Amino acid sequence: MSTSTALSRSASLSLAQQLALRFSERIQQRLLLPGARLPSVRECARHHGVSPYTVVAAYDQLLAAGLLEARKQRGFFVRDMRDARAPKAKAAPVQAVQAPPTPIDASALIRGMFQADARHAPGLGTLPGEWLDLPMLQSAMRRVVSQSEEPDQLALQYGEPGGDPRLRSALSRRLEDIGVHAAPEQIISTVGATHALDLITRCLLTPGDAVLVDDPGWAIEYARLSQAGMRLLPVPRGPQGPDLEVMARLIAEHRPRMYVTVSVLHNPTGNSLSLASAHQILKLVEAADMLVVEDDTYAFLAPNHAARLSALDGLKRTIYVSGFSKILTPAWRVGFVAASAQVVHQLTELKLLSTLTTSPMMDRAVAICLEQGQLRRHAERVISRLDAARQRVVHLAEEAGCQFVTPPQGLFGWLEVGVDTERLAQRMLDAGWLIAPGLLFSPTRRAGTLMRINFATSQDARFWRLLQELR
């Protein structure tokens, strides 16, 4: 295939497959030598007139074929098969790249999100940048530097192992608003909620342990637990919460150590636990001597009175996790854990070994946003805007012939589109739209006709017209 030939949007192969094949042939013909660096995702997208998502998908296929290697913070390089560090098996032949597209996985979705333009990313997991309050963030950072009693200590030294004391105090007051009673000493700050979940896994679980997870649920959590050596036990998630009969059976058969769940504004369905389900879950876990990790990442988009397991349990068997990437900015990697004093002590010891401390300046900036009520007012504005966006998207989706599997709530909608969404995702990528197909949210990688949409980034009628045409 000549590199001067334009990619064809009418070919039997998707644009991602064509692009992967093009690079594969050049590697096999040694026109690209071992160690050669491929263009960046953005550069390659501009050169070939495709979306960054198409390039990500093509590079993922080449990685899977053994032709490339990814080097952290440097990019993608042609693999040297003579290198002792490389697998002994030869790279997959060019035909492997022509095969049906590699399934979109958690890593591919994340890379796509980093390249994403929110205007063309209905599958995005965060709020669009224009919805965030940049002046509030800038003001908080200025106050950290100029108004701190000990600015040198914040800027030039390690922070406290548990996190900034002002942040922990502000978080303790915030948690009271949602019925979770935690003293500042029962709270530890982390580098985002994902870091919090990772600390909990490494601290409280052992490879081989069984862990209950929601089905559907978040692909990153599945991947993280699996890589840590845990056995995943999927529990079907319905509008009121998990299937309690299935949960009881899995507990009896496998004696799991932990249940990891999103109680409020669940990802991807948008559902929240009913109070009755919450009580039944706590009865089951108490009888089984289990722990519950409650990921409340979307807390600021939800009502304070929503049923939370940590509030009902009093942090006896529950561990509460949250963060600020969904409401403040993904760039501020600030999360936290609230738990019993014993668990927090264990997590703090592991945090010291893994990251030393979190950023005292970031912790303090979030504390200022909480203390002054700025974050609360910002959240109220976002909720109002999100309500309007949700109404518009529901109308557009139904006009396009799609149906919501669960009542639309929160940031995400769980949508039945009537066709295989993995294949649909490839075709939408070719057209420049990033969607999140249902298999991303299946612990068994089960393909199907469901997909998750972000109400804030799915308001463009052009997307729904294209979706209707491709269906």
Image (tube, rainbow, N blue to C red):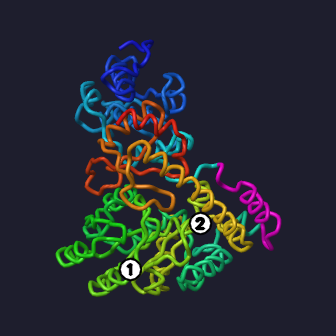
- Which image quadrant: the N terminus? top left
Figure quadrant of residue 35: top left
- Inspect the image, locate mark 1, and give the three-letter code of the amino acid beneath it: Ala
Other residues around mark 2 within 10 Å, as few (<14) / some (14–19) / many (≥20): many
- Looking at the rendered structure, the number of numbered marks drawn on it comes to 2
Other residues around mark 1 within 10 Å, as few (<14) / some (14–19) / many (≥20): many
* Majority secondary structure of magenta residues: helix
* Distance from Cα at disc 1 to Cα at disc 2: 32 Å
First reached walking from the N terminus: tag 1 or tag 2: 1
Looking at the rendered structure, which numbered label has been put on residue 38?
A: none
Badge 2 is on which residue? 358
Residue 447 rendering spot, x and y as whole percentages: 27, 47
Tell me if residue 150 is in the magenta stretch.
yes
Q: Residue at x 35, y 27 (%)?
A: 14
- Looking at the image, residue 319 sits to the left or right of residue 222; the answer is right
Q: Residue at x 43, y 32 (%)?
A: 54
Q: What's drawn in magenta, residue-wise?
A: 130-151
Q: Residue at x 42, y 30 (%)?
A: 430
- Looking at the image, residue 325 sits to the left or right of residue 271; the answer is right
Element under disc 2:
loop
Element under disc 1:
helix
Q: Residue furthest right?
A: 146
- Inspect the image, locate mark 2, and give the three-letter code of the amino acid beneath it: Thr
Nearest to the observer: residue 287 or residue 120: 120
- Which image quadrant: the C terminus? top left
Q: Residue furthest left?
A: 253
Residue 407 rendering spot, x and y as whole percentages: 42, 62
Badge 1 is on which residue? 278
Figure quadrant of residue 81: top left
